[in-house]
Image (spheres, rainbow, N blue to C red):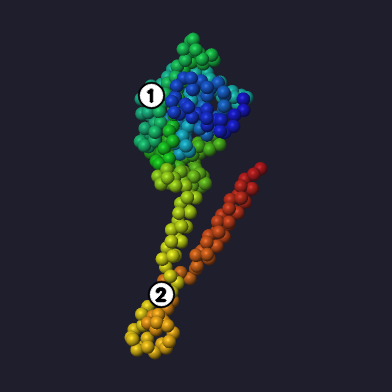
Amino acid sequence: MSIGIGGIREAFAPFFRDPDRAKLRDILKDNLGEFNHLDYKEMMIEASKLARVIISMANSTGGIIVFGVRELEDNTYAPIGLDTLEDKTHIQQRLSRYIPENLEYEILDFAYDESEFGLLRGKKFQVILVRDTPENIPFLPESAGESIQRNRIYYRGNTNSDEATYEQIQEILERRTTALTGMTSKERFKNDLFQLKVLYRHLSPARTVSKENFAEALGAGMGGVWGAWYESTLNPYYPEESFDEFVARMIARKKSIIERAIMNADQRRP
């Protein structure tokens, strides 16, 4: 069964909103495989390794970890279930050493009765649901462990939980800023540009000053009443660079950034 990215998100969305056995069954029976938002484990894993996955997901829009699913040789996944469900409090205690307090996750138990749900009948699963709270990212490990380093930024990408790249860190910061301000980087840029334009309107390239004495004004001839009383001198605080010149310079810089990004992408292609 082939499902696009949009379909995968749709499959997860109901479970995130209201997790229950039927919705977990739908995820398992479709055999979607692992994605950035979905990780399968055959059994409970070592605490620091699990914390790394949880923190990575929390930094990249959340996700779910399902325990009781085995990866087969053909890269498909079989819901074999767990022999026992580990105590939730015990799991949380083991994770508390590594996970920040404001990282939101839930541990859920699912047991399927003998009379229901086909292949899942009689099986038990545990699920860790990692919430997406972009206003709190990035999440950093509280301490180091076997599979995790303190104060590192981990990110879930390509189904792996690795240290974030520069681009991923920028994405994290952008998501946080958008969550806190309600504005995307594009909207902020347009707003900054508008404000700069307003500032330029309030700053004249020349200043009008009164002449020091009336005699000097009378000696100015018939150049007009205004010219007789006032003269125009250059404003020393006005920028040498005009607004149009500034925009042109920013366009050139932005083009250079885009060109480097395209070149880097081409170099990464096999």
Up the image or down, 134 lies above or below 244; here it is: above
Q: Is residue 179 left or right of residue 267?
A: left
| Rendering quarter of residue 176 | top left
Instruction: State the mark number for residue 88.
Output: 1
User: Mark 1 falls on what kind of element?
Assistant: helix
Q: Which one is earlier in the sequence, the residue at label 1 or at label 2?
A: 1
The answer to whether residue 73 is left or right of residue 102 is right
**Which numbered dot is residue 57?**
none
> Three-letter amino acid code at disc 2?
Arg
Could you tell me residue 22's position as x and y percent?
48, 19
Residue 258 location (% of width, % of height): 58, 53
Residue 104 pos. (x, y %): 39, 33
Residue at (36% x, 25% y) in the render:
89
Q: CA distance from mark 1 to mark 2?
A: 72 Å
The residue at the far left in this view is: 213
Say which residue appears at 56% left-offset and 30% top-offset.
7
Residue indicated by mark 2: 207
Closest to the observer, 63 or 96: 63
Q: Is any atom of residue 255 visible in this view?
A: yes
Q: Which residue lies at the image location 52% right of the left edge and 64% below the top edge?
A: 244
